Amino acid sequence: LSQPSKSSRCDKLAKKFILYTLINSHLNQIATKYIS
């Protein structure tokens, strides 16, 4: 029973990481636009 909850927690963490990466790359694109 502890296995599913652990995997769902990992899934949430993975989603957060993907979201953070997408936002970070988006901000980098905006920054490079303004710098150049």
Image: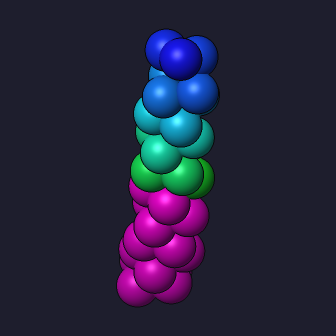
In the rendered image of this protein, does residue 17 appear above or below residue 4? below
Front-most of residues 18 and 35: 18
Residue 22 magenta-drawn? yes
User: What range of the chain is rendered magenta?
Assistant: 19-36
At a point 53% along the width and 37% down the height, the residue shown is 8
- Percent across and percent down for residue 28 are 48, 66
In the rendered image of this protein, does residue 10 appear above or below residue 36? above
Figure quadrant of residue 29: bottom right
- Magenta region, mostly helix, strand or loop? helix
Figure quadrant of residue 27: bottom left
Front-most of residues 15 and 26: 15
How many numbered discs?
0
Residue 30 appears in view: yes
In the rendered image of this protein, does residue 15 appear above or below residue 26? above
- Percent across and percent down for residue 30 are 46, 81
At a point 58% along the width and 27% down the height, the residue shown is 4
Front-most of residues 2 and 20: 2
Residue 10 appears in view: no
- Percent across and percent down for residue 13 are 46, 39
In the rendered image of this protein, does residue 22 appear above or below residue 30? above
- Percent across and percent down for residue 18 are 57, 52
Front-most of residues 35 and 27: 27
At a point 55% along the width and 64% down the height, the residue shown is 22
Q: Is residue 2 left or right of residue 7?
A: left
